[in-house]
Amino acid sequence: MSSVLKKWLPLLMAIAAVLCFVGAILILVFPVANADAAYKTVIGIIIAVLMIVLSLLIALYLWLSRDTEPNFFLFDRQKKRNIPVEELTFKLANERLNFLLTTVSESPEELWTGDVLENELKLGYRKVYRPLIAYKMLYDLADKDVESYWDYLLSSTPETVNSICEALGQAGETEMVKALRFIMENYRQDPSKICNFVRGNQKYIRGRIMAYIKRKIEWFY
C-alpha cells in the first residue's frame, strides 16, 4: 500500500496544485467579480490568494523533491530519471554489476588475483560496493559455469578467500561465510564439492544481491 501511495503521490499533488490554481482563477472571475457586498469580495480574494499560494507551494515542493541525481542502479538513461526501487529487476541490477566489474578490474582474472576487494578507492562510499563485488564474483562462477572461471576460485589464495568472506560479512552474511571458509580450507583436493557449493547457493546469492541493493539504495548516488 505504501509503495503504491509513494508512486502516485506526486501525480496526486500535481493535480491538486492545478485544481487549486484553476479554482482560484474561477473564484476571482465569478464570485468576486459578481459579489454584492464588499466583505464577500474581500473573502473571495483572500480564499483565491490562499489557493494560489497553496498551488505554488505544492509546485515548489514537487520541483525541489525531483530525483534528478542519477542512482547507479535506478537511473533510466532513456527516460533521464531514476525508476522506483520497486521496479528494479535482477536483470537490470546484474547489468549494472557487470559494468561495475569493468570499472574495478581489467579482467575477471584480476578480480581473483588482484587486491580489488581491498582497494578502497574502487569500493565507493564506506566501501558500499565491496559486498556486491564479492557476491557477483561468486554468482558469475555458477552463472557462466566455465572452467576458466572455476579455476580462479579453485586456485585462489587464502588472502583472496579471506577478502571475499570479509566482504560478505560486511553485508551481514554469517553462515555462508563460515561454510565458504570451511569448504575452501578442507576440500581443495575435491573441487567438485566446492563447485557444487557455489552452484547450490546461486539462487540465494541472487536474492542477497537484490536485498543488499534495496537496503542500501540511498548510498548508490
Image (cartoon, rainbow, N blue to C red):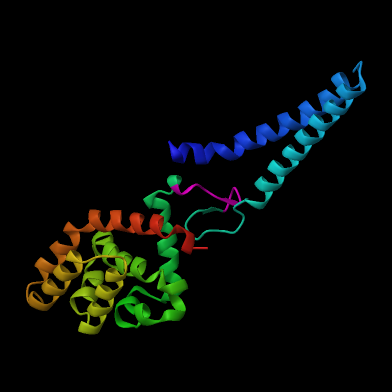
| Viewer-closest of 39 and 166 | 39
| Residue 75, percent from left and from top | 53, 54
Residue 83, magenta (yes or no): yes
Identify the residue at image location x=34%, y=68%. Answer: 131
Q: How many circles with numbers are drawn on the protein?
A: 0
Q: Is residue 71 left or right of residue 176?
A: right
Identify the residue at image location x=86%, y=22%. Answer: 40
Identify the residue at image location x=49%, y=47%. Answer: 84
**What secondary structure prevails in the magenta region?**
loop
| Viewer-closest of 122 and 155 | 122
- The vertical placement of 150 against 158, above or below, is above
Quarter of the image for residue 94 reads bottom left
Q: Is residue 146 left or right of residue 60?
A: left
Tell me the quarter of the image containing the N terminus: top left
| Residue 195, percent from left and from top | 15, 66
| Residue 129, percent from left and from top | 40, 69
Q: Is residue 214 left or right of residue 177?
A: right
Range shown magenta = 77-85
- The vertical placement of 70 against 56, above or below, is below
Quarter of the image for residue 189 reads bottom left
- The vertical placement of 29 against 221, above or below, is above
| Residue 31, percent from left and from top | 85, 19
